Amino acid sequence: MTILTVPTEPFSDQRPGTSGLRKKVRIFRQPHYLENFVQAIFNALGEVRGRLMVVGGDGRYYNREAIQIILRMAAANGVGKVLVGQGGILSTPAASLLIRKYKALGGFVLSASHNPGGPDGDFGLKFNAANGGPAPEDMTDRFYEESLRIREYRIVQAGSVDLEVLGESDLEGMAVEVVDPVEDYARLMEHLFDFNQIHQMFNSGQFRMRYDAMNAVTGPYATRILEEMLGAEPGTVVNAQPLPDFGGLHPDPNLTYAKALVEAMYSGTGPGFGAAADGDGDRNMILGRRFFVTPSDSLAVLTANAHLVPGYRKGVVGVARSMPTSQAADRVAAFLGVECYETPTGWKFFGNLLDAGRINLCGEESFGTCSDHVREKDGLWAVLFWLNLLAIKKRSVEDIVRQHWRQFGRNYYTRHDYEGLEEAGARALMAHVEDRIRGLAGHSLGGRKVSYTDDFEYVDPVDGSVSRHQGLRIGFEDGARLVFRLSGTGTEGATLRVYIERFEADPQHQGLDAQDALAELIALADEVARIRHYTGRVAPTVIT
Ligand code: VG1
Ligand code: CO
């Protein structure tokens, strides 16, 4: 066996963001760039000799090449065996599942999630730890430190591994097993949800759905589970083939980028249920006929109804949401008498709570929801959960959500994103907001009394670690909130996210369009942050 030790120089920009290292493809393809980061991870991990690892990705451009490099480096670093999804495919939740189920030391998930792909698009690498979740902050800090002092990496000299044929082969002393990316995942879903009941609903001929895989990783998963196992009619899953450039789509399941699905659901003859997932399969969008379920509401509805579904019969032990997510889930948690934790943006903060058994459901406003079955958000899981609820309740998506609002009140909610901003302007805006909101507590702003303002700080209740500067907040006494933060996943300039929320208890006033209901607060956010002045923009890029 020939192990090469290749001399290299550090790059200075390999600090992982909200969700791993995410860069333009052309940056990842620079000589030694991927290799350096992978070796930095091995260096930080320490002893990997003889251990099992998992590798797979969302099928985007450069996925296969990157997998071959990682396999050769894993062999050179002494890894015992690697599980790879066939064709290099593994959705993020499926990778999380394989790591957990087969007790791997961890895994490499190749994806830039909802960011566009192709030669001019984005690529990403995220390391997930032994619990199946994204590496926690102290670990990603170590990866970064190692990346700054790297001087060499190890790689074996060998040909490519055939990723198409299922089964085990040898790569210079390391076993590589190519596995069906869907099988274990589908078994788990069958265990969590009542597949018979859902099957009957599809069989009744009264129920149709449309699932848009957006030419990304969930195509094979959705086709197998929805069409083959649950009997949804052929063609239910559209854009089902994972393509290296996602067919030119932006695989982000929201009202702007999942346009075709939204149009189908708002047309007269549309199906009763619509759903989509993102590039790597961890996000979901839920739609009824002419009705959009905000991810924040989705989390609240799932929490309120979890006990009806087989996997959660014993009920919810606790729930968590990311800070900018609406407070709808808090109300359900209070009703159930369980804790609702508020974590910083990004999935890695849920891991400790899940591992400690403090929560079994969690979610983010950014189209992420999940339970303790894996340690990532899981798009298709949320879709199956909704399908199971529809089969049980035999009512429309809209009915279910409106009934929920009548019982718990409605948290009107919207997120306004300003993408591709000039960095300096975006930073100046944040500095201005920080300054502007200091000492506002107790005073009135836009006719509302401010109860607190802060830069969100999180103390992990399990390990005591502290995460600072997670977003600027203005909380009002009536429960309304404004939140400002800069994205940690973008690869072009800066992205400003403004999150706006207010609570409406009165069923008579729960029927407004969210933008109308929040118009005053939207204007207030604009005024407080001087958005036009600092960004030069008169309108957001994406409104959710
Ligand atoms: C965004 C979302 C965040 C999500 C993250 C990763 O981060 O706001 O809620 O966890 O993307 O999602 P940011 O820093 O750009 O706001 V994805 O589907 O990577 O995996
Ligand atoms: Co994603």
Image: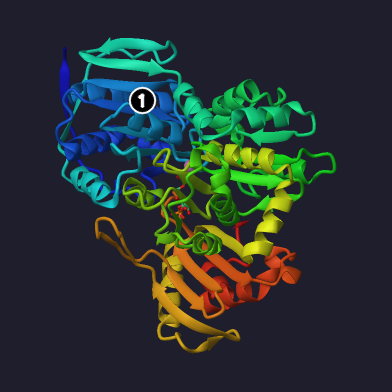
Q: Is residue 241 left or right of residue 341?
A: right
Please name the residue shown 25% across and 60% down the image: 464
- Percent from the top left, x then y, of residue 106? 29, 33
Amino acid on which disc 1 is placed = Ile
- Residue 251, quarter of the rendered image: top right
Q: Is residue 202 left or right of residue 122?
A: right
Q: Secondary structure at mark 1?
A: helix
Please name the residue shown 57% across and 71% down the image: 532
**Residue placed most toward the observer, 378 or 405:** 405
Q: Is residue 396 left or right of residue 18?
A: right
- Percent from the top left, x then y, of residue 321? 46, 57
**Residue placed most toward the observer, 69 or 500:** 500
- Percent from the top left, x then y, of residue 215? 59, 31
Q: Which residue is mark 1?
A: 67
Mark 1 Cα-neighbour bin, 10 Å: few <14, some 14–19, many ≥20? many
Residue extending furthest right?
A: 268
Please name the residue shown 44% across and 49% down the image: 491
Residue extending furthest front?
A: 314
Q: Work out whether residue 510 can be spotted.
A: yes
